[in-house]
Image: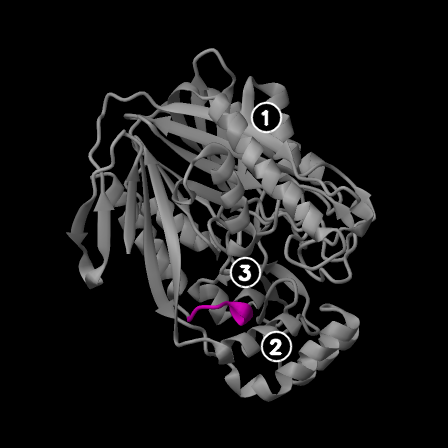
Amino acid sequence: MKKYISLLLALALTLCLCACGGAEKNGTAESSDTVLQVGFGRELIMPEDFTKAHLAGGDAANRVAKSIKDNLYITCVAFKQGDEIFLLYTMDTINSSTEITKPAKAAITQLTGVPAENIMMCATHTHAGVSLTYDWTGLPAHLRMFNEAAAYAAKNAIKDLAPAEVYHGNVETEKMAYVRHYKLSDGSFAGSNFGNFGNGVIVDHSDKADGQFQLVKFVREGKKDVVMMNFPAHATFASTADTYISADYPGPTRAYIETNTNSLVAFFAAAAGNQTPNSNMPGEAIFGRSQYKEYGAALGKYAVDALPTLQKAEGNTFKFLTTTYTGKSNKEKLDLLPHAPEVVAAAKEYGNIHSKTVELARKYGFSSYFEANAIIGRAKTPDTRTMTISAMTIGNVGFIFAPYEMFSSQGVLIKSKSVCPTTFISTCSGGSWGYLPDARGIEIGCYEACVTNFAPGTGEELAQLFVDTLAELQK
């Protein structure tokens, strides 16, 4: 099923067309001389009592906040062309699951009248944000505040709308991202995070990282520019053991750009499923784990230096397209299912990453508790799964919204084959399907491949679907 939204009409005209595989497409007519307007709104999403808040990322049950490093925000960029409005959010949360976004969208619609289908919500994927799904004391009140903040960010963004010209570009960085899979001294490979390194010594990263990010700048009449930025690295300077609240490096990146330019900044996670912002390699790490502010400033400087060089977009016509993808479910390692409940029970007693849980998991052949839990889920799921993906174009600038953690190789594929000279990638967007590893990650048995919801090859299929979707939008 495809849904096509153009913001060029006061009255919607629906066209039913046939697509391969029996999919349907809804289209609307366009008017090339309608002015594009862009607005910006941002609100705090901090807990009332941070000492009760549990943190997302890793072991939410045992990660209770002890301090605040910096604030968490929800940001809305509003687009208007004709009489219709589209709202694009980025928020300092670990994901954008329906559990989180459905009530938020309801609050947004109630306050602004913008329908849910015209709202896209994306996560920066910080692992030091407040958990919006684990049931901690004070969560109901925090969720009410979150939904209200989302609604007011939209209200303010709509109020802030102004005519805008669009500029875009691709920026290369040096050693700012690393593939978090490693080659060991014995020639074998180890996965990330919870993978088993055994007695091997890390000698190299398994693959070359993608250090390119995209910038889209909206130069507005009489108001500050709005800058959208992405970057393909996890927001994981805060480890699964740390207990402070932080937006991680996206926060300092935003702050650096805003301090050094006449801009308001919205930061998005890019193809970061297998990449990290710092390195475990001796002598190669630019920044240590505690230096996320320095890292954010360094990344922000790349953006500031690049902003004057951006190219003006060809046209300003806004289009948005959603389409569904059905793929095979991951049914790997179901033979381990009899032992999985024991590992899950240990995690409930000791914690997800406690040494006793890890030892028990590996005794039975699991890479971690997370794989054991995933296998329980696999046994209950149908043979296929369906997700919704979205894409957007403004003139010849492309945007994709993936509801999963895309691997960097898939992002490179999309950018290299896209019809758009700049293709802005936003992952953890419009849903939360977890990791979709590439063939290389599956080959080396990385952690992400052990817990993915979909069968091998899905990531590559979706990458091509995004390329095709952008091509359709550019017709």
Q: Which residues are magenta?
A: 449-455
- How many neighbours does mark 2 have within 10 angstroms: few (below 14), some (14-19), or many (20 or more)? many
Furthest toward the front, the residue is 110
* Residue denoted by label 3: 206
Disc 3 secondary structure class: loop
Q: How is the image coloured?
A: one colour
Image location of residue 419, percent across then percent down:
28, 41
Secondary structure type for disc 1: helix
- Residue density around tag 3, few if under 14, some if 14–19, many if 20 or more, within 10 Å: many
The quadrant in which the C terminus is found is: top left
**Residue type indicated by callout 1:** Ile
Label located before the other in sequence (1 or 3): 3
Tell me the tag on residue 374: none
Provide the secondary structure element on which disc 2 rests.
helix
Q: Nearer the viewer, mark 1 or mark 3?
A: 1
- The quarter holding residue 11 reads top left
Residue at image position (64%, 45%) is 144
Q: Is residue 315 left or right of residue 157?
A: left
Q: Please give the label number shown on residue 257.
A: 1
Along the viewing direction, whichever of 174 and 459 lies nearer the viewer: 459
